[in-house]
Image (cartoon, helix red, strand yellow):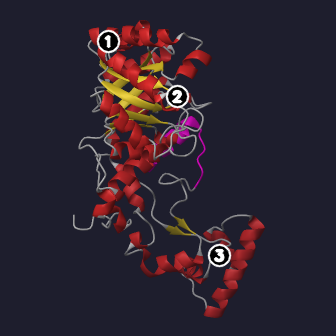
Amino acid sequence: MSEPWKTDRWFVSPWNYLPEVTAGLNFKKQIKIHDVTLRDGEQQAGLVFSKDQKVALAEKLAEMGVHRIEAGMPAVSASDAAAVTEIVKRNLPAEIFAFCRCMKDDVARAVDCGVKNIVIEIPSSEHLIREAYRWPLEKAVELSIEATQFAKENGLYTVYFPIDASRADINWFLDLIEKISTEGHMDALVLVDTFGGISPHAVPWLVRKVKERIAKPIEVHFHDDFGMGAANTLMALAAGADVAHTTVAGTGERAGNAPYEPLVLSLLTMYGVDLGIKTEKMYPLAKYLREIAHMPLRPNHPIIGDTIGQIESGIVAGWYENCGLELPTEIAPFRADLVGQNRTEVVLGKNSGVPNINLALAALGRTATEEEKRGLVERVKAKSFEKGGLLSLEEFADLL
């Protein structure tokens, strides 16, 4: 592709691909998306999925091309265990994981569900172990060794998930993961930013420090408390991480997890990294999730918001009038259908201008003089202020 920043589906900055910009990037060839919507996503306050809804979500995620699905935590409830078991039975084209605490009983419950892969958690910052868990530090180490060895004995691919890693003393943390790697067992390590407090510039440093100490695949699980989840995940992948933990629409504890939508789309368009995800299913999947979870989303949310294809500004409506139908990426960074959205639509409101009026008249099969159009602009603005929102085409017809 001679111009990867400009295709028939997107148009982003050419500066993204300059050699001096890309020189330090170290993306792996086989990056995987590990979706945690069914487990960590459901930890969002008030969010509840039934067993059937979890199975349906897993099927939609697999159909989209998501590589790994964390189906749930069997120890949480019988319903969770049943959902994990049923998802495993579906033989979906994705790797299915269960989530466990560092306890042999949790691992045994996962085995009973039929999974071949687990993510196993333990607190990893000294202060959290002491203050939140009220454990002696040795207990976290001992449980980790015992549970991960038990997972290995049961033939499970084991991903070690040290909670609150980003706020741990770095030497303590590195000693911990090295000890578990040698005396316990881990097939991969997750760098966990439980409280979303790591900055994008600190992420590559952390990836490098861990790689210096252990030779294991690196996964990243970043929360979105400061709105940095997707950015931090991208920085980690650019530094050589292998797997990104994400959720649909950024669902999850407190402010949620790193949303997969901006991460996957940015990798594809701005970095030329195609993860094989069917991006045209992004909006339909998010809409399905919102419907079953009764979860609101701001209308102009990036990629999956309901109104991101609407144009109210008269200036931009003029751009659309001139080239929008033939050259849609001149007035948007990506085509609406790239993410399964409806096509761009010019609407009428307080910011409208004559181009909005022209398109509305054309939609109604009506004409007007230039003076009449200017008068209509003022009437549309006044009506929009009176209504406190956009005008429908029917309301515009009444103004005519």
* Residue drawn at (41%, 28%) of the image: 55
Residue 49 marker:
2
Q: CA distance from mark 1 to mark 2?
A: 38 Å
* Residue drawn at (31%, 52%) of the image: 24
Main SS class of the magenta portion in the image: helix
Disc with the residue nearer the chain's start (1 vs 2): 2
Q: Indicate the secondary structure of the residue bearing disc 1.
A: helix
Relative vertical location of residue 265 with respect to residue 347 in this rendering, above or below: above
Badge 3 crowding class, 10 Å Cα cut-off, few under 14, some 14 to 19, many 20 or more, is few
Using the rendered view, name the quadrant where residue 22 is placed.
bottom left
Q: Quadrant of the C terminus?
A: bottom right
Question: Label 3 sits on what residue type?
Answer: Ala
- Examine the structure image and report whether residue 334 is included in the region drawn in magenta: no
Q: Is residue 398 left or right of residue 12?
A: right
The residue nearer to you, when weighing 197 against 174, is: 174
Relative vertical location of residue 22 with respect to residue 190 in this rendering, above or below: below
Q: CA distance from mark 1 to mark 3?
A: 75 Å
Q: Position of residue 81 (x, y in %)?
A: 44, 16
Relative vertical location of residue 342 with respect to residue 241 in this rendering, above or below: below
* Residue drawn at (45%, 29%) of the image: 170
The residue wearing badge 3 is 397
Q: Is residue 358 left or right of residue 277?
A: right
Badge 2 crowding class, 10 Å Cα cut-off, few under 14, some 14 to 19, many 20 or more, is some
Q: Indicate the secondary structure of the residue bearing disc 3.
A: helix
Using the rendered view, name the quadrant where residue 96 is placed.
top left
Residue 307 marker:
none
- Examine the structure image and report whether residue 290 is included in the region drawn in magenta: yes
The residue wearing badge 1 is 183
Q: Position of residue 264 (x, y in %)?
A: 38, 48
Residue segment shown in magenta: 282-299
Using the rendered view, name the quadrant where residue 181 is placed.
top left
Q: Quadrant of the N terminus?
A: bottom left
